Amino acid sequence: MFFQKNLPGIERAIRVAIGFCLICFGLLFAQHGWMTWSAIGAGVIAACTGFIGFCPMCAMAGRTLQVDPLFTSIKEGAMFCSTSVGMHLLRGGGALALIALAIHPGSSQPLHVVPLILGAVLLLRGCPMCWLIGLVQTIGNKRT
């Protein structure tokens, strides 16, 4: 196997569901422009990562599943939660701004896209879905 699974079970199901929703949105509601292809592409990527249990962006960020030595079963590793909800939202807002700058239709320098997307991946600590699940975990950690 060329990859090691790095997505827990619940996140895999969420990725597949969101992927199918994005594909349906792209096919049914978008006006056959860049938004259609973006939604379909994001949906295919999300669904595929959910099916195979491996996210390349999560792997670049160092995320792995941890093996429990007592039961030799895979348990969920620490997700990318922040110390506070405000800091997590600030990171997400910064990443969203970088993504918006990268896909801005009026940008005259296409070479700026790569560093902007890489900066967004670093701020999100992986993919946007990892950031969203990290937000849920951050909120959950504050309640316990």
Image (spheres, grey):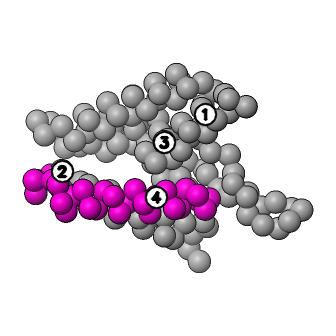
Please name the residue that numbered disc 2 is placed on.
35
Precedes in sequence: disc 4 or disc 1: 4
Precedes in sequence: disc 3 or disc 1: 3
Three-letter amino acid code at disc 1? Thr
Q: Secondary structure at mark 1?
A: helix
**Left or right side of 65 for 87:** left
Residue 95 found in image quarter:
top left
Q: Residue at x 60, y 24 (%)?
A: 84
Three-letter amino acid code at disc 2? Met
How far apart are labels 3 and 1 at the CA level?
Answer: 10 Å
Instruction: Using a 10 Å C-alpha cutoff, classify the residue at mark 4 as few (fewer than 14 neighbours), some (14 to 19) or many (20 or more).
Output: many
Q: Secondary structure at mark 4?
A: helix
Give residue 129's position: percent from left, percent from top.
Answer: 46, 48
Q: Is residue 132 magenta?
A: no
Please name the residue that numbered disc 3 is placed on.
132
Read off the magenta span. Answer: 7-34
